[in-house]
Amino acid sequence: MEHYFTNSQNLRSEIRSISYENKGQVFTFFSDLGVFSKDKIDFGSRLLVDTILENEKRKNLEFLDVGCGYGFIGITLSLILDSCVEMVDVNKRALHLCERNIKENKIKGKCYLSNVYENVEGKYDFIVTNPPIRAGKAVVLEILLEARNYLKKDGVLWFVVRKDQGAKSLIKNIETVYNCEIVKKEKGFYVILAKMH
Ligand SMILES: C[S@@+](CC[C@H](N)C(=O)[O-])C[C@H]1O[C@@H](n2cnc3c(N)ncnc32)[C@H](O)[C@@H]1O
C-alpha cells in the first residue's frame, strides 16, 4: 500500500485548489493526489493553526514546519504572523505543491526536502508539526524530541495529535525533555504546547 509520504513515479496528477478562511482573509492552496489531506484542509491542522494564532501575538518570528505537506500550516502562519518560515517534507510532490503555494500566497519562506531534521540548519522561535503518525512512532518521536536542537533559547514546539492516536503516550514519552500543556481539545484532537525544561 502506498502512503501519502512515499514518492511514487507513477502517480497520476489531478491538481485541485483548496481555500481556507481566517477572519475574512482567504488563503488558497494547490493540492494533488498522493499528498496528505488532498481534498480539504485537515481538521487537526486547522485546529493547530487556530490555536497558535489565539496564543501567539508576536510578529516577525522565524519558525519551522516539519512534515509541511502542501504547506497549509507554514504558509498560513507566516502570512498572519508576518513571519519567515522554513518547511520540510520527504514527499517530493508535496514539496512541489508547497513551492507553488509559497509563490501563490507570496510569503517569506522556503521549503525543501528533509527526512526529519537531516537538512535543517537553523534555530527557530517555534517549530510546528502535524506529525506523520502513519510513518510510525519512531519517526514521530524523532520529530518531537529532536526539535529541541533547532529551537532558540525559549523556543517552543507546537503539535497536534488525536487522542486515539496515542496523544497521552506521546506526551509521556517527551516529558523528560519538555513541559507539555494541552492547550486545546476538540473532536478528539489535542493541540499541545511543549516548552523545554
Ligand atoms: C499529517 S501530514 C501533515 C501535512 C501538512 N503539514 C498538513 O497539515 O496538511 C504529515 C507530513 O509529514 C511528512 N513526513 C512523513 N515522514 C517524514 C519524515 N521522515 N520527515 C519529514 N516529513 C515527513 C508526510 O509526507 C506528510 O506530508
Image (spheres, rainbow, N blue to C red):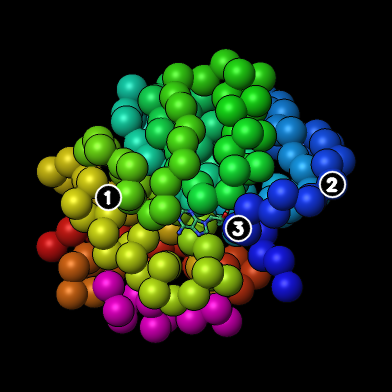
- The residue to which callout 3 is attached is 5
Separation (CA) of disc 1 from disc 2: 38 Å
Q: Quadrant of residue 180?
A: bottom left
In the image, the segment drawn in magenta is 163-174
Q: Nearer the viewer, mark 1 or mark 2?
A: 2
Indicate the position of residue 5 as horizontal and vertical percent values.
60, 58
Q: Residue at x 41, y 31 (%)?
A: 85
Callout 3 touching callout 2 (CB < 8 Å): no
Residue 117 visible from this viewpoint? yes
Q: Amino acid at mark 2?
A: Arg
Q: Amino acid at mark 1?
A: Val
- The residue to which callout 1 is attached is 156
Residue 22 visible from this viewpoint? no
Element carrying mark 1: strand
How packed mark 2 is, by other alpha carbons closer than 10 Å (few <14, some 14-19, many 20 or more), is few
- 105 sits left or right of 126 in the view: right
Q: Earlier in the sequence, mark 3 or mark 2?
A: 3
